[in-house]
Amino acid sequence: MSIHNNCGLHRVNIENLAVYDGNEPIISNVNMEFHCGELTALIGKNGSGKTTLIKALLNERPHTGEIKYFDNNSNQITTHKTGYVPQQLAFDKSTPVSVLDFMASTVTKRPVWLRVKKELRNSIQKRLDDFNAGHLIDRTLGELSGGELQRVLLATAIEPMPDLLILDEPVSGVDINGLDMFYKKVTELRSKYHMAILLVSHDIGLIKHYADRIVLMDRTVIAQGTPNEVFQTEAFKNIFGYTLKEAENNADNI
Amino acid sequence: MQTIYNIMEAIIPFSFIKFDFMKNALLATILLTPLFGMLGTMAVNNKMAFFSDALGHSALTGIAIGVILGTKNVIISMIIFGIIFGLAIRKVKSNTKTSSDTVISVFSSTSIALGIVILSKSGGFAKYSSYLIGDILTISPADIKIMAIFLIVVYIIWYFIYNQLLLLSINPSLSASRGIRNALIENIFVVTIAIAVMISIKQIGILTINSLLILPAAATRNICSNSKQYHIISTVIALVCGIAGLVISFYAGTAAGATMVLIAAAVYFITYLKSNK
């Protein structure tokens, strides 16, 4: 197994994490760990706190408890890079921002209303080409289809190369071909760069196929382990009403 | 200042330039309107049109506080109150489940009412009514110096926060993942808009100031497809509408601020029709 090329991140431990809305806990007592070179899927019903946990990981929401990052020798590290692919974008479709503007703004402080430097444009073009999205560079974000947008967001999230890549329900609004391409790319990133990937998804079939580990949430972690382990738990059946066999059938249909 | 006046008289072949108040008004317009075109791009991106409207209205309370404290130049009290007002709305918005338009409306109504109550005490509101529609006669060379200094500061701030604001407007979690401190960036933007609005109110007017911020950017969105065009065209539209509005208002005897806004509105509808073709 190759060693990570960046800061040497090995695993992320979440200990006793809680996020409050006023006095009400949205999620509490969350304990989990996930590793580099693994795709960990975060699953649960709507409102189970998956997105809240992601926001805590991104430091967007204040939280109690600890999020610790460890290197290969189990020493705690403080510097790590996080890439994030959001579920959707909040802007209105008429916003005049091109794919180039958007991607450039994530890596440079030089305002994008000045001309984007040629070297930067070339490097963005190359990254987009890798994701079959090279032709989209001068389109506005609002013109992109769901699948195109996801590829652009993924291409954006890997520069600078993250140690931890968080994908928030990236498959919604994407057709089946786009979906396939997206997951193949994510799998490739995992093995090529040995990054830790945390994926929020509803699609049990795809998770069965692609995830190394699963964490099932319902305002706290109620099951975690390999897909087979989690699919056999009572907690999983209670939440999804699936049996393991049904889940497998579901996966075969992909 | 006299040198600038002489240059203006030499290069502008119209009769209005003979008057010093028009020279001051033109200088102020040249300084302020591009600023509004520029800030407007992000105010519209971040869906802050109603917010900046409320901010303009809050100037009434700012003036009232200045009057109570007996300050000579109410612009200082307007700026300070505007900054507090803007930051307070942002804070309450992020701490409540009430929708943001309701929160803004509550703040806006309160500040208008408070301003009117204080200023109308013993029946003296009429003398402040020029603030409602703006008055170019009140622009002094000292005001222009304040504007010029502020403009430089805003350009510097703008250079450093633009990309971060852009990402924030696209997706706050994404900007957080890039190490951007969302709340700080939003606060800086709110303060910048508050100052820009307050230093312009004397000329443009409380009732029309927000239109000058929103219309150029809104018009530009109809016809452009990237940040560079958005920025440049919005700035140019604001400047051209500003100057045209000022000159027309001089000959037509109308309020300058409202005339500028009417022209910007016409530009908006032209670009709207063009985009729907």
Image: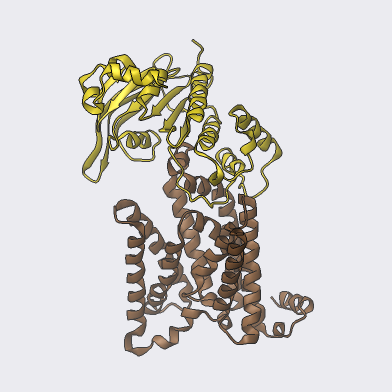
Front in this rendered view, residue B12 or A205: A205
* Marker count (numbered): 0
Residue B25 x %, y %: 62, 77
- Quadrant for the N terminus of chain B, please: bottom right
Q: Is residue B86 above or below residue A103?
A: below
Asked where in the image residue A247 lies, by quadrant, the reply is: top left
- Tell me which residue sits at (54%, 68%) in the image: B212
Residue B113 x %, y %: 33, 75
Using residue B222 as the reference point, say whether residue B17 is left or right of it: right
Asked where in the image residue A167 lies, by quadrant, the reply is: top left
Q: Is residue B244 above or below residue A120?
A: below
Q: Give the color scheme: rainbow, by chain, secondary structure or one colour.
A: by chain
Front in this rendered view, residue B163 or B237: B237
Residue A153 x %, y %: 52, 35
Drawing shade for chain B: brown
> Which chain is tinted yellow?
A
- Tell me which residue sits at (46%, 62%) in the image: B49
In the displayed image of the protein, which residue is found farthest to the bottom?
Answer: B123
In the displayed image of the protein, which residue is found farthest to the top?
Answer: A1
Q: Is residue B29 above or below residue B253?
A: above
- Quadrant for the C terminus of chain B, please: bottom right
Answer whether residue B25 is visible to the viewer in this image.
Answer: no
- Tell me which residue sits at (34%, 55%) in the image: B93
Using residue A109 as the reference point, say whether residue B170 is left or right of it: left
Answer whether residue A33 is visible to the viewer in this image.
Answer: yes
Residue B109 x %, y %: 34, 71
